[in-house]
Image (tube, grey):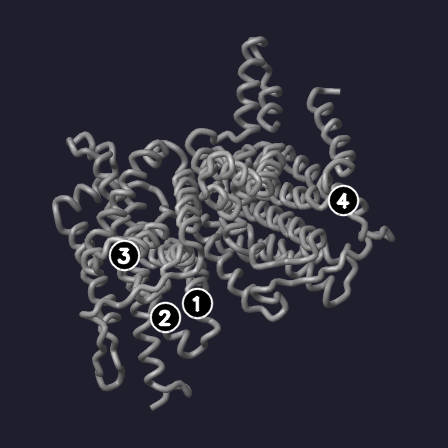
Amino acid sequence: MEIFGVPLEAISGQLLLGLVNGSFYAMLSLGLALIFGLLNVVNFAHGSFYMMGAFAAWIGLEYFGLNYWWMLLLGPLLVGVVGMILERSLLQWLYKLDHLYGMLLTFGVTLLLEGLFRSFYGVSGQRYAVPDLLSDSTDLGFIVLPDYRAWIVLSSLIVCLGTWFMIEKTQLGSSMRAGTENSRLVEAFGINVPLMRTLTFGFGAALAAFAGVLAAPVVQVSPLMGSNLIIVVFAVVVIGGMGSIMGSIVAGIGLGIVEGLTRAFYPPGSATVVFVVMAIVLLVRPAGLMGKS
Amino acid sequence: MTPRQTAYAVALVAALLLPLAVYPVFLMTLLCFALFACAFNLLFGFTNLLSFGHAAFFGWSAYVAGYVLASLGWSTGLGLVAGTAVGAALGLVIGALVIRHQGISFSMATLALSQMLYFFAERAPFTGGENGLQGVPRGSLFGLDLHSDMALYYVVLAIAVACYALIMRVVSSPFGHVLQAIKENEPRARSLGYEVDRYKLVAFVLSAALSGLAGAMKSVVLGFATLTDVHWATSGAVLLMVLVGGKGTLTGPVVGAVIMVWLDNRLVNFGNFLGRATSIDWFNQLGRSVTMVTGLIFIVCVLAFRGGVVGNIASHFLQRVRKSKPAPSRMEGAHADST
């Protein structure tokens, strides 16, 4: 069976790949949205946290013999701590200034981290094996589904929806949202806003690192993997609407699928389609699909 | 002559004599980046719009100028004009898309759109992909043969100085004052009846056109255009030049460009020196990971040195002048702001 001359297997294969990419977009843009919401910082270093997550997985296995599942737990914790240290030591001094400076600082942090990893590991990618438990694949009839890909999509959905639930439905989340609206008022109610900012930044960084560990077996682990991805994620955030939690999840997965379909029907356009969509959204709905205008 | 005019005269004489002492191609590269930084500063420093996509204008103009010179056999002058026009046209299209956005979302949108143009450059048939566009001839301008480094240097210097004068004129013109009003308080400027978005768009296009000219010149000087020119790292590099030199000052971007290009050039030696001195092998890598040092400078600048070299020194100097002269007139204050 074919659609517009493209076999169905190819389409469903690309669709799955798109879903996998979309899961990464969703997790990364979710973390960006959280950080932006509470700290008013566009965290350029988010791509570096993702890269560090993947490297944590690789280093853990290579030097300490810790397997994938351990690193899936330890990687985000470690990178989350790194994020919190960065926030405490550097970022917190800039909240009173123009928001641009936060972005500039994290841009500098990105260059520093990327350069640091490059000076140790070069630019060529390291390979990381798929964990044994998930190395099989399941035949669904219309498509052969590698278990690991299914695991990426499933776990990222759980993490995204769990985060959404935490922000929208719990006490902690409601004080976070209140802090986004008016941090001084929330502080007057006795909530420690600076601590909340630090934890939020750490959580966002951990989320990016989780995505990084998940990505390690399906991409080349290289120092440049983060910055290449982060710009696409920026486009996703602009499309979804700045700071909107649900917007970033939906836009992330949606754009992954759009990208996959483009790769099936018009391969040369797959690298740019997200940016084209962004240009259209900028024209039609400048505040983004789910943003408040 | 005022001290300012004296300083400019001294700088000009120095610029005329410098190629006798320093390798002219290095100086020309420096001038191209200085012009690029000044053009960027017109937007970032004087309008407070942080574009993260200026490499798109710089790089695409470099490609187009290189292409019309190398493959279509256009004259050098026309090539530079074509590059400028490409910068302006791209600036108009991208500017029209993003100009309604403010602050951070403006930066993110420009970054994403420039990344799209990067991918176009990677795929386009005439750019040479990963290899870049090679063998751009220098040709001649108004009968002057540009193959000698000295001749080309003085042409590049003349263009750069002319553009600098243009930027200086724009900043002090009524248009420039409206830009400053927008920078200081946009809602206020709007309420005074200025069409803020149109002013910003004109500034954006002007900045893109001059960045384009800088890119086109770079193509002629070095004889090639590569993907590096359109890469986001170049947008970051020009941003850093302005930040180091002093955002919103006239001379700042030039100083910043000098510092950064020189550093880029010297870092290998410095790394090797540190490597020998401390016998830590890792320092020898320093030259290859310019990004790391760049990142460090970024962090220091943003945290502690936001005025840049010119901004911080100028403000320091100003404070001393204010102390010795109790009541400076408002005009002097305005002049001092645009050092």
Q: Give the CA separation, mark 1 to mark 3.
A: 31 Å
- Residue A179: which quarter of the image? top left
Q: Give the CA separation, mark 3 to mark 4.
A: 52 Å
In this picture, residue B84 sits left or right of residue B185: right
- Label 2: which residue? A258
Which of the pair A269/B66 is nearer the observer? B66
Q: Are discs 1 and 3 both within one chain?
A: yes
**Element assignment for label 1:** helix
Q: Give the CA separation, mark 2 to mark 1.
A: 8 Å
In this picture, residue B235 sits left or right of residue B2: left
Q: Which disc number belongs to residue B156? A: none
Going by the picture, which residue comes out furthest to the right? Answer: B143
- Residue A178, horizontal then vertical, whole percent: 21, 41
Residue drawn at the location 59% of the way across and 9% of the way down: B325
> Where's the N terminus of chain A, which quadrant?
bottom left
- In which chain is the residue bearing label 2? A
- Label 3: which residue? A57
* Residue B328 vertical position relative to residue B99 in the rendered view, above or below: above
Q: Are discs 3 and 4 both within one chain?
A: no
- Label 4: which residue? B153
- Label 1: which residue? A273
